[in-house]
Image: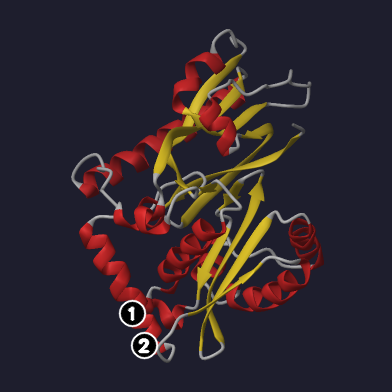
Amino acid sequence: MPASEVALPLRVGARTLITLRRRLARRTLSLDEALGGALPALPDLTDGEQGYFVTALPAALVGPLTAGRRALKPFVRQRYRRSYARLDQDFDTYFADFSAKSRSTCKRKLRKLAERSGGALDLRCYRTEDEIGVFYALARGLSAKTYQERRLGAGLPDGPQALAGMRALARADRARGWLLFVADRPVAYLWAPAEGLTLIYAYLGYDPDFADYSPGTVLQLEAMRQLMEERRFRLFDFTEGDGQHKRLFATDGVDCVDLLLMRRTPGLLATGFMLAAFDGAVALAKRVAGGGPARRPRR
């Protein structure tokens, strides 16, 4: 777990006000680790390292992880539900667990986009090394148009190194890519690499010209259908963070935090307290705007 310069943004919604950077040893727990419940190993810090940044840590492990580390001050950056879906089940059983309203909404969106596509959905799955090359060329062009890339800098990675990495995953059968087409025009993409038997929700985007058709929702639902029929993977990890899309498609979740463990120097303590105050103010504003703590709706 080498130390690197970790960005610590102060963000309100999609807008980043300022970004602090510190030399931290970063550790992100996989879904299997989070479900396993064991404490993550944190090696001793070197002289140049200012602390740890542990992400996707189960909330129940914060106390045990920080116990006995008196030279470090813990700061929780965010709390969230890490959502995931079980793929080792029949799709009809999975879909039946959606609320009646969600099922009706999804069916309407599928029907609407199928009608726009000439009567049938055109969803293509890419898995082999050669197929990933085709997927990448089309998905990168689409990603450049998306809100995720233009506003959040979270589009599909660009460049030969990114493509080489995706090809390597495909050679090992450790990834899936999907493109949703309308009249041979790609309108949504999803890229999901794998860790073991877990697929990871890495990049999803859609053409803003087709936003009224909810192509991202349609693609995700049909990709879940394919994965449950394929039975190659066991879990679909929607990763850290919350959102309506993840709540809709997930079957389970783990309450997690992103945890900073900072050396107790005046400058680093000031950084930690400033981040904690800012994050607390943003969380309070969200609760006030939403009328109280958010409820977890039925799918």
Q: In which quadrant will I find the N terminus?
A: top right
- The residue carrying pointer 2 sits among few (fewer than 14), some (14 to 19) or many (20 or more) residues within 10 Å by Cα, namely few
Hey, what amino acid is under mark 2? Glu
For this rendering, which residue is in front, 236 or 155? 236
Q: Position of residue 2 (x, y in %)?
A: 77, 33
Q: Is residue 116 left or right of residue 123?
A: left
Q: Is residue 245 above or below residue 235?
A: below
The image position of residue 230, as x and y in percent, is 57, 59
The location of residue 164, given as percent across then percent down, is 81, 62
Q: Is residue 86 left or right of residue 49?
A: left
Q: Is residue 30 above or below residue 92?
A: above
Kind of residue sitting beneath label 1: Arg
Q: Given contact means CB atoms under 8 Å apart, are the residues at marks 1 and 2 in contact? A: yes
The residue drawn where x is 55% and y is 16% is 66
Res. 72 mark:
none
The x and y percentages for residue 248 are 35, 55
